[in-house]
């Protein structure tokens, strides 16, 4: 069962890593035509039926949806409960959104295309933030990278949907859209490398609810507790040794005093007026 789950984690990680195909296809399709600007023109223009190679771009959107959703389903055991499940639902929303973008080009069904794009952008940004909290017990660095990407995506999504001119329209949309494949690829690499660890038991991620292996934070806490226990044992041993030394010193001092008293009594001579035949007779004082 552990090997099966380990293979599942690796396949899911590979699916997330392959979401980088979007950048390759976008670049290839862009150069099929002329006059396209990544700063000024939105991504959907490459999928419009008027653009050369739009079929390839729209196919890439559909493939992207399959990779996001398939990788998320395969990686569910590694994501755990709580934030991991929230991330899974949000990535599902993003997958449905990019599917609509690919199936319904902007010049054919602008309304549903826009709905799909919004679903993708929102699911991507918030999903990465939830994924950061889910995977942070594995690696604080990984969690930090994912949450930064999620925050960048969230800000760019707000600017793009509200048409705030912080950057050009195309640049703003790309700042919102690019964070998901980048974040999934980074997370996929991390999960793929640690996939062998999933062979323990039913194979789940370290630090999750069903995983018997401790997370790094738990390992550090256990190490601190073990060090504190060793320090208490050492202090107790030192205190016991000090008490034994004090007891031996006390007995030695008492014995010496008794010996001196005994020697003094033995060396003392009886009084001259002591009458051994009549011990009750009064003693005579001698001056």
Image (cartoon, grey):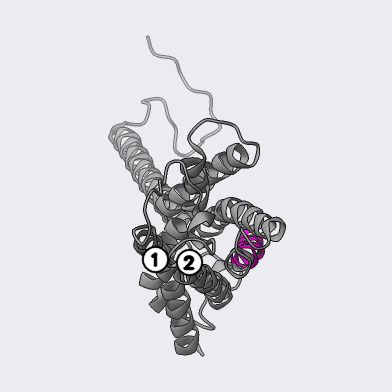
- Asked whether disc 2 touches disc 1, contact meaning CB atoms under 8 Å apart, the reply is no
Q: Tell which circle, 2 or 1, labels the residue nearer the N-terminal end.
A: 1
* Residue at the image point whose x is 38% and y is 26% from the top: 271
Expressed as whole percent of the image width and height from the top left, the position of residue 175 reads 48, 45
Choose between 71 and 172: the one closer to the eye.
172
Horizontal side of 41 relative to 209 (left or right) equals left
- Disc 2 crowd rating (10 Å Cα; few below 14, some 14-19, many 20+) is many
Element on which disc 2 rests: helix
Residue 86 highlighted magenta (yes or no): yes
Q: Which residues are magenta?
A: 81-98
Expressed as whole percent of the image width and height from the top left, the position of residue 117 reads 62, 56
Image position of 167 with respect to 139: above or below: above
Q: Quadrant of the C terminus?
A: top left
Element on which disc 1 rests: helix
Q: Quadrant of residue 106?
A: bottom right
* Residue at the image point whose x is 44% and y is 80% from the top: 11
Choose between 166 and 237: the one closer to the eye.
166
Image position of 282 with respect to 106: above or below: above
Q: CA distance from mark 2 to mark 1?
A: 10 Å
Numbered tag placed on residue 25 in the rendering: 1
Q: Quadrant of residue 155?
A: top right
Choose between 183 and 172: the one closer to the eye.
172
Q: Choose mark 2 or mark 1, whichever is in front.
A: 2
Residue 178 highlighted magenta (yes or no): no
Question: What residue is pinned by disc 2?
Answer: 54
| Residue at the extreme top | 287
């Amino acid at each position: 069962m552990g090997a099966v789950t380990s293979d599942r984690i690796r396949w899911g990680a590979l699916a997330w890593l392959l979401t980088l195909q979007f950048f390759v296809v976008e670049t290839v399709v862009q150069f099929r035509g002329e006059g396209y600007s990544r700063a000024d023109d939105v991504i959907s223009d490459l999928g419009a039926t008027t653009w050369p190679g739009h079929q390839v771009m729209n196919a890439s959107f559909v493939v992207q949806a399959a990779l996001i959703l398939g990788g998320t389903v395969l990686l569910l055991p590694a994501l755990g409960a709580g934030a991991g499940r929230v991330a899974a639902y949000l990535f599902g929303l993003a997958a449905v959104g990019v599917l609509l973008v690919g199936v319904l080009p902007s010049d054919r069904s602008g309304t549903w295309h826009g709905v799909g794009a919004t679903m993708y952008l929102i699911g991507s940004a918030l999903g990465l933030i939830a994924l950061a909290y889910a995977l942070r017990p594995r690696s604080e660095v990984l969690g930090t990278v994912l949450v930064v990407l999620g925050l960048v995506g969230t800000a760019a999504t707000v600017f793009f949907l509200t048409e705030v001119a912080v950057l050009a329209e195309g640049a703003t949309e790309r700042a919102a859209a690019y964070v998901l494949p980048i974040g999934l690829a980074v997370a996929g690499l991390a999960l793929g490398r640690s996939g062998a660890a999933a062979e323990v038991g039913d194979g789940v991620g370290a630090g999750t609810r069903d995983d018997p292996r401790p997370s790094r934070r738990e390992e550090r806490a256990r190490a601190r507790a073990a060090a504190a226990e060793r320090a208490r044992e050492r202090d107790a041993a030192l205190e016991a040794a000090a008490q034994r030394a004090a007891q031996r010193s006390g007995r030695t001092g008492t014995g010496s005093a008794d010996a001196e008293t005994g020697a003094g009594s033995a060396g003392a001579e009886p009084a001259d007026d002591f009458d051994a035949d009549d011990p009750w007779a009064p003693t005579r004082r001698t001056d």
